[in-house]
Image (cartoon, helix red, strand yellow):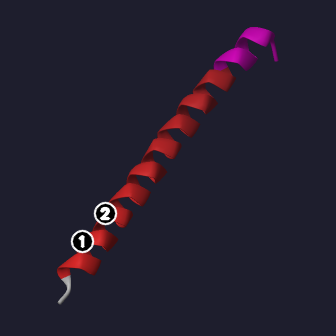
Amino acid sequence: MSLDNWCLHLSQASQIAFIVCCYLLTCIMLGFLLGIAIAYGSP
């Protein structure tokens, strides 16, 4: 495996990791906001 291929593979992996992190953060934020809405919305 040449160095160029390894760098390309690494960049692809980091892009996937970045997308997964953004997705998880979005899910956590939505869950947090939903929890607040339910907590303050319930009588």
Residue at 52% x, 44% y: name it: 21
Which residue is nearer to you in this view: 36 or 11? Answer: 36
Residue at 38% x, 56% y: name it: 29
Residue 25: where, in percent of width, then height?
45, 50
Q: Amino acid at mark 1?
A: Ala
**CA distance for labels 1 and 2:** 6 Å
Residue 15: where, in percent of width, then height?
54, 30
Label 1 CA crowd tier, 10 Å (few <14, some 14–19, many 20+): few
Residue 14: where, in percent of width, then height?
61, 30
Residue at 47% x, 52% y: name it: 24
Q: Amino acid at mark 2?
A: Leu
Q: Quadrant of the N terminus?
A: top right
Q: Quadrant of the C terminus?
A: bottom left
Q: Main secondary structure of the magenta part?
A: helix
Mark 2 lies on a secondary structure that is helix
Residue 6 shown left or right of residue 25 in the figure: right
Which residue is nearer to you in this view: 37 or 15? Answer: 37
Work out whether 32 lies above or below 2: below
Magenta residues (range): 1-8
Work out whether 5 lies above or below 39: above
Residue 27 shown left or right of residue 10 in the figure: left
Question: Magenta includes 15?
Answer: no
Residue identified by numbered label 1: 37
